[in-house]
Amino acid sequence: MNTFLYLLTVLIWGTTWIAITFQLGVVPAPVSIAYRFWIAAAVLLAGLLLTRRQWWPPRQAWPYLFAQGIALFCLNFLCFYYASQWVTSGLEAVVFSTAPLWNAINGRIFLGRPIKPQVMAGALLGLAGIVLLFAPQMAGHWHDSHTLLGLALTLGGTLCFSCGNLLSSRMQSLGLTPWLTNTWAMLIGSTTLGVAALALGMPFTLDESPRYLGALLYLAIPGSVVGFTAYLMLVGRIGPDRAAYSTVLFPIVALTISTIYEGYHWTPLALCGLALVLAGNLLAFLPPSLRAKLMGAA
């Protein structure tokens, strides 16, 4: 079951990055995100009611739901949607693949979990890889505030995602399922974005092009309902650190798609960077027995 959830998460989330870029343009980013999670929350709530599962959270869950809604379904996606204007979707996925490392660090800060030495070694390799991957894109653009802002937003979105992971882990320890918590956290996050968009005078328009509507439905149902539920089920089954290991495989899918649709150009430096990111995550989160076998084979 864990393997199935891993593969499902990787295939869906590895392709959502490019779908996000299809939504940029006519509709303001906060409004697009609100549409996405209103649809996803409605589908999840209908599923809970039809299957007669618990649909109303207990009182002690609401502080965590509000925090998760703001971190995971509001700030996280605001960062990635705006970053997509200046950073290719494939490179966003590469930065996002460092989520396991941030989960380990945040677990230490907020939950007192120990950080293993190989996790820190993996973090250093991963960060070095990100530098190499971004070096070709940043050549001649180190004074380009938009490109630097895109990178900063991508890192910020990854940190928000990590915080949402820990909150989900906490709620599942209270016996709450991701079906229930995702429903209300998505509703909280999307409504927060909707209210903020109204306050800022953003138009609630709808791009009626097949490209936009197709991306919206894909992001709302497979990307949000299925993807987040599968991923957060993994968080509950094996913990946030190991579950986030699935993000290591996202760059392979996302960079392949980015090469086709966004004209991402591979360079020897970029290939070395991707190898370092993958090696860092493997070093940090592969089981010791398997890691020893791989090192022995090498």
Image (cartoon, helix red, strand yellow):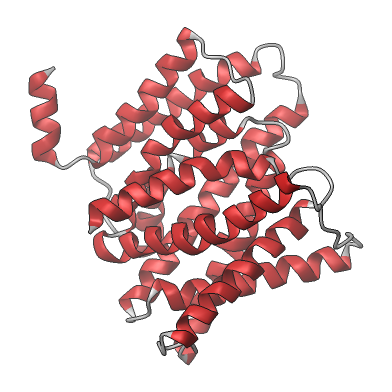
Q: Quadrant of residue 145?
A: top right
Q: Is residue 26 above or below residue 293?
A: below
- For the point 71% across and 44% down, the residue is 211
Q: Position of residue 246 (x, y in %)?
A: 35, 45
Q: Quadrant of residue 66?
A: bottom right
- For the point 71% across and 28% down, the residue is 147
Residue 66 visible here: no
Q: Of all residues shown, which one is farthest toward the top?
A: 268
Quarter of the image for the N terminus: give it. Answer: bottom left
Q: Could you tell whether 86 is left or right of 202 in the image? A: left
- For the point 52% across and 54% down, the residue is 223
Q: Is residue 9 above or below residue 62?
A: above
Q: Position of residue 181 (x, y in %)?
A: 47, 75
- For the point 25% across and 33% down, the residue is 283
Q: Quadrant of residue 51?
A: bottom left
Q: Could you tell whether 5 is left or right of 43 in the image? A: left
Q: Is residue 11 above or below residue 191?
A: above
Count the numbered circles shown: 0
210, 10: nearer the viewer: 210
Residue 282 visible here: yes
Q: Position of residue 19 (x, y in %)?
A: 62, 43
Q: Position of residue 136 (x, y in %)?
A: 59, 14
Q: Could you tell whether 246 is left or right of 290 in the image? A: right
25, 154: nearer the viewer: 25
65, 222: nearer the viewer: 222
Q: Of all residues shown, which one is farthest toward the right?
A: 201
207, 187: nearer the viewer: 207
